[in-house]
Amino acid sequence: MFTHVVKAGETLTQIATFYHVPMTPIITANGLVDPDVLVVGEALVIPTEDVIYIVKPGDTLTKIAQNYGVSVQYILQNNSIANPNNIYPGQAIYIPAKQHRVVRGDTLWAISRRYRVTLQSLIQVNNITNPNIISPGTVLVIPHKNRPEKSVNGYIYFLGQSAVPIVSENGGYLTYLSPFAYMIKEDASLQPIDDVPAIQTAQAEGAIPMMSITNFTVGFRGENLASVVLNSPALIDQLLTNIISIMQQKGYRGLNVDFENVLPKDREAYNSFLHQAATRMHANGYFLSTALAPKTGPTQAGLLYEAHDYPAHGRIADFVILMTYEWGFRKGPPQAISPLDKIREVLDYAVTVIPRNKIYFGFQIYARDWTIPFYQGEEATTISPQEAVTRAARFGAVIQYDYIAEAPFFVYTDDTGQAHEVWFEDARSAQAKLNTIRDYNLGGISYWALGYPFPQNWVLLEDNFMVRKL
């Protein structure tokens, strides 16, 4: 898999030819509406198991061949190299993925052992629907890399029938689906949501429904509401009873607790509630997860952070979701929504107090469009990464990239003369986040939120990891 950044004057035909990939897979992987319209600075996913290796100082063909498990002759027959002993830094060398033609008696397991790749990777790369049936003569692509298994959660707040097409499209990439969210009340009841269509569609796609509860809304911080419930043993008992009743009725298999703005004085009360919740969940065959504010240390001040006890959540919950997004929030000035340099500061702390396999990386898959100059009180518009690129094309913007935040952005002027600044996600930023998950050996990923088209993400997710299905 490659990421190609469009240069001025390039066409999709030229790009496809360079990478030895047909245009159709590129169009599909990137959701290109008009293949003739590319934006300068746009990052395209090039879906292939082939490799284009850029020669570095000191490289030899023998060394390159050994690194990729092929022969020097294999490289020579696929490249126009005049002198095998005279390659130069910066030279592009094309290394096609190995292929295996199935013969009678072959099994996928035996083929995976022969080429030292995982069975799951072999199945995934070749889109095999029934691993027990492979026909002689079938040509299989052998993946260059193995894909570790990760759990993937997706929150969704588009509910009712609106959820069905979204979950149908993305559910195959998910371990869990979390309709957001049941709002707790001061009497320990829960505000109902129209989650049945999402649950049923998730189950059809092999994703496990995870019930989400919260104490806040967009216009209501909920700190006093949380305090009332968390400090009442009777209300806690009733709340957990109500939660389990809904889970049993609707088919949820686990609970996600997203209590935010909890008062610092209620930190231990919150921990106690989670302990009781875990006990009740496990007794009924369910799991418990929590959502955590992005802290960089145990003493970080602020209403959002102080009551979120990372070590306690790491001990009590089956897994935790780090909400590593919203630096660029709706009512703030334009900036990267999920800057990777800031996320790494959170992870550096989190992995010291929470088991890595319990940590899910919070991954934002939406974009924001701010009017500029920014004035306090104004709000950005939330759009999809796909719409962001469409706007860049419409207004002739050049997409730029912040290599510290690992985030793309651009500025444009609309039809009324108003200036805008847009920060979004693209193939580069998504791959950088997936690399970080691998680097920190985290247990999973949690997307906030489904419903904002970003086809590149799902292609890259599948290229990097196997999605755990339970």
Image: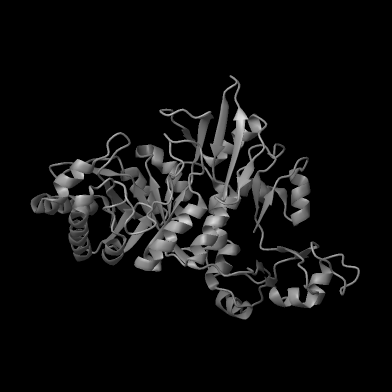
Judge whether 223 appears above or below 308 on screen.
above
Residue in the picture at 58% in, 41% down: 409
In this view, 254 is above or below 14: below
From this viewpoint, which residue is outermost toward the top? 416
Q: Quadrant of residue 347?
A: bottom left
Given residues 111 and 152, the one toward you in this image is: 152
Residue plotted at (27% across, 36% down): 220
- Outermost right residue: 82
Up/down of 171 relative to 89, above or below: above
Q: Which quadrant of the view contains residue 160?
A: top left
Q: Is residue 421 visible?
A: yes
* Residue 190 can be seen, yes or no: no
Q: In front: 390, or 253?
A: 390
Q: Whole-percent x and y of residue 313?
A: 29, 61
Residue at x 53%, y 45% (from the top left corner) = 454
Q: Position of residue 167 (x, y in %)?
A: 43, 47
Judge left or right: residue 395 versus residue 407.
Answer: right
Residue 464 x, y percent position in the rendering: 55, 62
The C terminus appears in which quarter of the rendering?
bottom left
